[in-house]
């Protein structure tokens, strides 16, 4: 019996799937796993350096609320999820920053993925939150049936064993809002980290 190599076998499966009117998934290495199915990119991968907020200097971030959590990876490294929100600026803007930090280089991918939740005082008026990014904004609004609303996810990812993936921009808040919560999932996977490590952190600003 003739033994097919991997490339020939995958091609055969794709052809066979097309013949039956369905799509057959090809084999994938664990290094190529992604975690962005329900997300949209905030920026081009590997394009932005880490950004660390600091107090008191014009143009830098004045932190009102922040959260930091950690988890161990499959190889014993420590992964941190960091989430920061600033105080409310004029025009309803709140600066935010999210990051994933990892203390080893035994992985391939590092990602920070985040969403915002807005809460209104009541259902008689609406409140909305818009997450600003260079990759396009994403919004959510409360309704007469619900005082809370959640945006979709945005993500920023580095793919060359970097120790950091960070993103910084602002949230635009409108309407009769009571508080906004930013939730960030940090994750690492690939190379020696064959089992993805992930940890959430979140922080809240009240009006």
Image (tube, grey):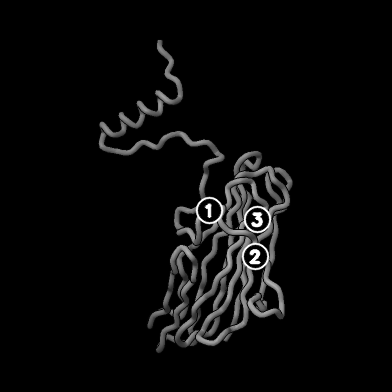
Whether residue 158 sits left or right of residue 149 in the image: it is right
Give the number of the disc on residue 164: 3
Up/down of 48 relative to 1, above or below? below
Q: Residues within 10 Å of mark 2 (few under 14, many from 20)?
A: some
Pick the quarter of the image with the C terminus. bottom right
The residue to which callout 2 is attached is 51
Q: At which x and y percent is residue 110?
A: 61, 51
Q: CA distance from mark 1 to mark 3?
A: 12 Å
Q: How many marks?
A: 3
Q: Quadrant of residue 16?
A: top left
Q: Residue at x 49, y 81 (%)?
A: 173
The residue to which callout 1 is attached is 45
Pick the quarter of the image with the N terminus. top left
Q: Residues within 10 Å of mark 1 (few under 14, many from 20)?
A: some
Q: At which x and y percent is residue 80?
A: 68, 58
Q: Residue at x 64, y 42 (%)?
A: 193
Depth check, front residue: 133 or 188:
133
Q: Secondary structure at mark 3?
A: strand
Q: Residues within 10 Å of mark 3 (few under 14, many from 20)?
A: many
């Amino acid at each position: 019996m003739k033994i097919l190599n991997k490339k020939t076998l995958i091609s055969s499966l794709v052809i066979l799937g097309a013949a039956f009117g369905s799509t057959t998934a090809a084999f994938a290495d664990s290094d190529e796993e992604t975690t962005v199915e329900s997300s949209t990119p905030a920026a081009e991968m590997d394009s932005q350096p880490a950004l660390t907020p600091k107090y008191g200097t014009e143009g830098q971030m004045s932190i009102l609320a922040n959260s930091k959590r950690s988890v161990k990876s499959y190889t014993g490294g420590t992964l941190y999820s960091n989430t920061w929100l600033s105080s409310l600026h004029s025009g309803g803007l709140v600066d935010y920053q999210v990051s994933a930090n990892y203390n080893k280089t035994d992985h391939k991918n590092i990602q920070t993925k985040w969403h915002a939740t807005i809460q209104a005082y009541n259902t008689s008026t609406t409140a909305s939150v818009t997450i600003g990014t260079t990759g396009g904004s994403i919004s959510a609004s409360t309704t007469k049936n619900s005082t809370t609303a959640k945006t979709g996810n945005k993500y920023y990812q580095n793919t060359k064993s970097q120790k950091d993936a960070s993103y910084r921009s602002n949230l635009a808040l409108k309407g009769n809002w009571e508080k906004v919560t930013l939730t960030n999932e940090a994750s690492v996977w690939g190379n020696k980290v064959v089992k993805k490590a992930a940890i959430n952190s979140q922080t809240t600003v009240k009006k």
